[in-house]
Amino acid sequence: MERLMKIDRRLLYLISVALVAVTIFMPLGLPVKVSPLAVQTYDAIQNLPDNSVVLIAPMYDPGAAGELNPMLKAMLYQCMERGYKIILGNTNWTLGVAIAHDMITPIAAEFNYVYGTDYIEFGSKPGGSVWMQSAQTDLAGAAIVDFNNDPIGQFPLIQAVPRLTQEYIAAVLVLDCGTPGAVEWLQIITQGTSIKLIVGEIQMSVPDSMTYVQSGQYNGMIAGSRGGAEYEQLVGRPGAALKSQDTMSVIALMVALFIVLGNIGYVTRKR
Amino acid sequence: MRKEGPMILTVISSLVVVFSTYFFLGQKWNLMEPLNNWFQISYAIALALGFVNLTVIHVKYIQRKREGWFYSIVLLLCMYAYLVLGMIQTQNGLQFDWIYVNAMSPLSATMFSLVAFFITSAAYRAFRIRTKEATILLVCALFVMLGRAPIGDAIWGNWSAFVSKWVMGTLNVAGMRGINLGIAVGGFATALRIMLGLERAHIGGSGTQ
């Protein structure tokens, strides 16, 4: 029994890889129930006034793309189906905007969104919270050029949104995986205003972010990969998050099983 | 003056921030805007300083043939080659952009993917019911882990979501709020100490007074 405590880690890695591979090729098709939090998040975006301008900030890098890409995709679909104008960009997460650029371009083409009028990408700007403060007083001055290095002030959407304040934007949608992230957008841009703050969060950060959801400072939160799967269903665009739920399930079960086995070995040895 | 100068600068800057944030006149005069611009400039200078610092350190490693000095050559070559390419092509240069996206993206994703394996192994090794507290932690972790995946619903039905939600929304939030409040108070106290010149670690002092 004591051997249960000393299972070779390489065996654990091998089983993990095998389980991931098996569930990718032979999905279990477990149903994913939609939670009230996912509905709250969906509604918060859906119920923004018509023709709203939303800022979408992909504050992540490829490490978190597995969890956050599906959320971003579903968010873009929901926003474009509602006809919102989109300002896309972030501060300090340079690869996040590259990922988002590849994602928004085909979706915008699908909805006949015109660059500069219906959506714009200002890229990634250095400065974190300080950049946000600058954008709060002068967006074009803070961004200077767009993702393609063209002067951003020439585009109608930026002329219509001179600063990131409640008069001009209805919501900030943040895909968050670290600092600067959703908390900085809350502190600088949305706190004390009518701007909604909706967050897509990696599972690791959900415990911390839950406090902001309960206090009402986040108007919605897509919580980890499971949240992404629920949100995809609500948007009506089942995608990568929903597909990954079987893998999540078997890996969670495997980890739980090995924890139990390890503890059986531990208790037996103690006796 | 080597220490007094930065200290005076810190006090003035922090007073400007406090005045601009909490007082009507400060907001009206918009004193934060020039300060923000200076911050952006300082940020760029700090980046350049980091560049020089890295060069000095790694050139020394190479000269002294310290263990792993070969990696220092790789680092310097990558750093300077990419800098030159960036200066020639600017931010959106085709090759400049291609290298960044196609090298950094897979590297970053690979690093993060490995975490899954480490967590699996670490969870198996670390979660032992050594004490009562550890047992409570283990039970909560199992419920939340399985409750956050559809398999939890399949095993326990609606109980899975209920327990997971209760642990995350009640136990977790209470704890996190306590921690966050502590951090906020600690941050405020530290800021106050820096403003009063009692905390000098950031200017190369011995720390506290």
Image: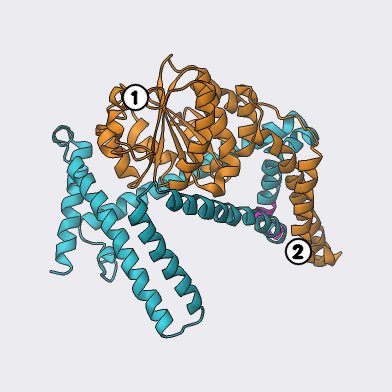
Instruction: Mark yes or no: residue A41 visible.
Output: no
**Up-down: is A222 above or below A205?**
above
* Side (left or right) of A114 relative to B31: right
Q: Which mark is residue A157?
A: 1
**Up-down: is B155 above or below B201?**
above
Residue A213 position in % (x across, y down):
49, 32
Q: Which coloring applies here?
A: by chain
Which amino acid, mark 1? Answer: Leu
> Which numbered disc flags the more N-terminal residue, 1 or 2?
2
Q: Which residue is mark 2?
A: A10
Can you tell which chain is drawn cyan?
B
Query: Which residue lies most toward the top here?
Result: A50
Q: In the rendered structure, the residue with mark 1 lies on which chain?
A: A
**Residue visible at 57% across and 29% down in the picture:** A74
**Residue visible at 52% across and 37% down in the picture:** A102
* Side (left or right) of A58 relative to A250: left
**Residue visible at 68% across and 31% down in the picture:** B162
Secondary element under disc 2, as helix, strand or loop, is helix
* Magenta stretch bounds: B128-135
**Residue visible at 33% across and 70% down in the picture:** B53
Residue B136 position in % (x across, y down):
67, 49
Q: In the rendered structure, the residue with mark 2 lies on which chain?
A: A
Q: Nearer the viewer, mark 1 or mark 2?
A: 1
Which residue is nearer to you in this view: B9 or A114? A114
Number of numbered discs overlaid on the protein picture: 2
Which amino acid, mark 2? Answer: Arg
Q: Quadrant of residue B57?
A: bottom left
Which residue is nearer to you in this view: B149 or B70? B70
